[in-house]
Amino acid sequence: MSNSTDNLQRLGHVIIIDDDASVRRSLSMMLQRAGYEVSAYDSADEFLAYPIIPSPCVILLDMRMPGTTGVGLQSQLKTLAQNVPVIFVSGDSRPEEIISAMKQGAVDFLLKPFTAQAMMDVIQRAMQLSEAAIVQADKSLKVSERLKRLTPREMEICHWMVRGYSNQQISTIDGGASATIKLHRARVMDKMAATTLPELIDMLMGADIPVPQRSIS
């Protein structure tokens, strides 16, 4: 396999959406020379007709185009590709458009004309965000699959474990025998593939664990 192909796999994919053909050509050539894979569309509507979003990926998006605007597409990306970083490029944008784009999570806003180095720096940073999002999504999927292995009773014990309760405290809360809770605790650790309690707590941070019916009185 050639070094060029290795670079493509390492650097990721950039989607360019701009109604200016000369801008699409120049950006495509620059990014391909740098080692990125590139897809180019002349409008947001063309992209939306058949959206292909590789991974990792960054979208370079023009603000003003015929049909769906850049901000309009950005809004739709929240459901279509929530974790794909968006960089706006524009030569003529109103302050409210820029504010709206940034509030919706744009990584950056480059005003034309911009330097090649400025573009590369922003794309590199955005690609790192895309890669981090992929890792996080994979982690969340694995955690979700592991949680499905727990029985309802183990899920209850897990709920209290990640909140720092000891076996004796859990026993006091729900009336279960301490020895039995210890067994459930070990099964939770095994099924969640966690070697320590801090690892389990970190793994389940932000996860949706059902609250036990029994609660502290």
Image (spheres, grey):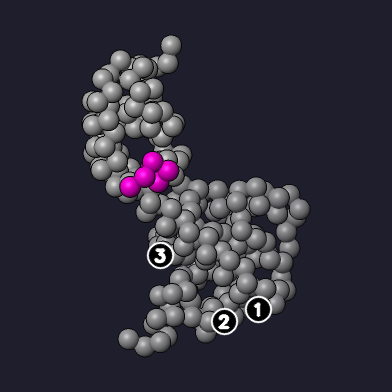
**Which percent across, then down, holds residue 98?**
70, 54
The quadrant in which residue 90 appears is bottom right
The residue depicted at 37 percent of the width and 54 percent of the height is 138
Where is 13 relative to 181, above or below? below
Look at the numbered discs 2 and 1 and tell me whether their residues touch, using CB distance below 8 Å: yes
Query: Which labelled disc corresponds to residue 116?
Result: 1
The amino acid type of the residue labelled 3 equals Pro
Where is 166 relative to 215, above or below? below
Provide the residue span drawn in magenta.
195-200
In the displayed orientation, state which residue is furthest to the right.
95
Residue hosting label 3: 54
Label 3 vs 2, first from the N-terminus: 2
How far is mark 2 from mark 1, CA to CA?
Answer: 8 Å
**Which percent across, then down, holds residue 150?**
25, 35
The residue depicted at 65 percent of the width and 47 percent of the height is 103
**Which percent across, then down, holds residue 162?**
41, 34
The amino acid type of the residue labelled 1 equals Ala
Q: Residues within 10 Å of mark 1 (few under 14, many from 20)?
A: few
Question: Does the magenta portion include 41?
Answer: no
Task: Tell me the SS state at disc 1.
Answer: helix
Task: Tell me the SS state at disc 2.
Answer: helix
Residue hosting label 2: 30
The residue depicted at 61 percent of the width and 48 percent of the height is 104
Q: Main secondary structure of the magenta part?
A: helix
